[in-house]
Amino acid sequence: MPMPKAMPRAMPDALPEPACEPKRFSADCPTRVLLDQMADKWSMMVLAVLRDGPHRFNAVKRRLEGVTQKALTQCLRRLERNGLVSRRVIPSAPLGVEYAITPLGASLQVPFGALYRWMVEHQPEVDAAQRRFDARTLPD
Amino acid sequence: MPMPKAMPRAMPDALPEPACEPKRFSADCPTRVLLDQMADKWSMMVLAVLRDGPHRFNAVKRRLEGVTQKALTQCLRRLERNGLVSRRVIPSAPLGVEYAITPLGASLQVPFGALYRWMVEHQPEVDAAQRRFDARTLPD
DNA sequence: CGGAATCCTCGAAGATACTG
DNA sequence: CAGTATCTTCGAGGATTCCG
């Protein structure tokens, strides 16, 4: 599984303070690692599930409606690789793997909470904007 | 351009408070619209550029290293559709289009600031976790 | 049970060319 | 200048099967 194929690691630029000079931005900003992680269809929900305590693979899977085994495996691998989730093998009878949130993963939920609140709060505006846009473009 | 092909609009579930029941999560949560927007390679940088004031298309393009006109057009369309950016045509001589951040888009930068600070602050830990993971998996 | 390996498809990203 | 149109490529994502 050659996962880290083209992991970008350059240009510590991003968007700290209002830059007024013609500063240029590059796509391979280190913060992209996290944005890409959040972009994953299931990452945030996995973290939400694991907030209730450690879960086995199928226990997580059962709480995620419509996730495939492959997608969940990839998602958990990436969360583990980024240090947000830990994986522990239980040498029991039929085999068992337990996933748990790490302190790092738990700390992410503070800023994510702020973002989540923004999304819930402004969702009507976004929805209205979308309907306005679609009304202007589609029915031509 | 039939952009809104399968825009999900269902299941107001997400991750509000520590749910302790076997609540199930679905991928077509409304908050995905915003997460997918943030996931875009250039969205956040476009917003950062527009924070300095309105810009013409090529003015934005010049500040984004490596972006193609197609990618930038798509990105701006989506930002406009979601109500985060406004588009204004200037009927000048050779034609001109000015993009500006909306109040809604500006308000997003508050929670995003928190997230950005988390990313910068914890990037060393993420980086270390990645190196640890890769050291355990690759060199077998 | 918790995956890894394989095959397949479909849609997104890039390059190029043309236009109001 | 600010896009749209068309073609191709390429790889993520789903379905299925096999393994420790």
Image (tube, coloured by chain):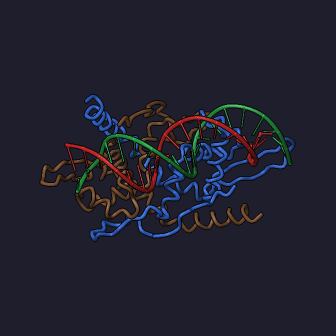
Chain colours: A brown, B blue, C green, D red
User: Where is B33 relative to A19, above or below?
Assistant: below
Left or right: residue B41 versus residue A60 is: right
* Residue A108, position as x, y percentages in the image: 35, 51
Residue lying furthest top: B139
Residue B72 visible in image: yes
Q: Closest to the observer: A130 or B60?
A: A130
Residue shown at 46%/64% (left/top)? Answer: B29
Q: Quadrant of residue A1?
A: top left
* Residue B61, position as x, y percentages in the image: 66, 38
Residue shown at 49%/55% (left/top)? Answer: B35
User: Where is B122 relative to D17, above or below?
Assistant: above
Residue shown at 33%/60% (left/top)? Answer: A48
* Residue A46, position as x, y percentages in the image: 34, 56
Q: Quadrant of residue A126?
A: bottom right
User: Where is A10 relative to B109, above or below?
Assistant: above
Left or right: residue B90 versus residue B137 is: right
Residue shown at 63%/43% (left/top)? Answer: B71
Left or right: residue D15 versus residue B33 is: left
* Residue A23, position as x, y percentages in the image: 59, 33
* Quadrant of the rendering where the C terminus of chain B is positioned: top left
Q: Closest to the observer: A44 or A104?
A: A44
Residue A21 visible in image: no
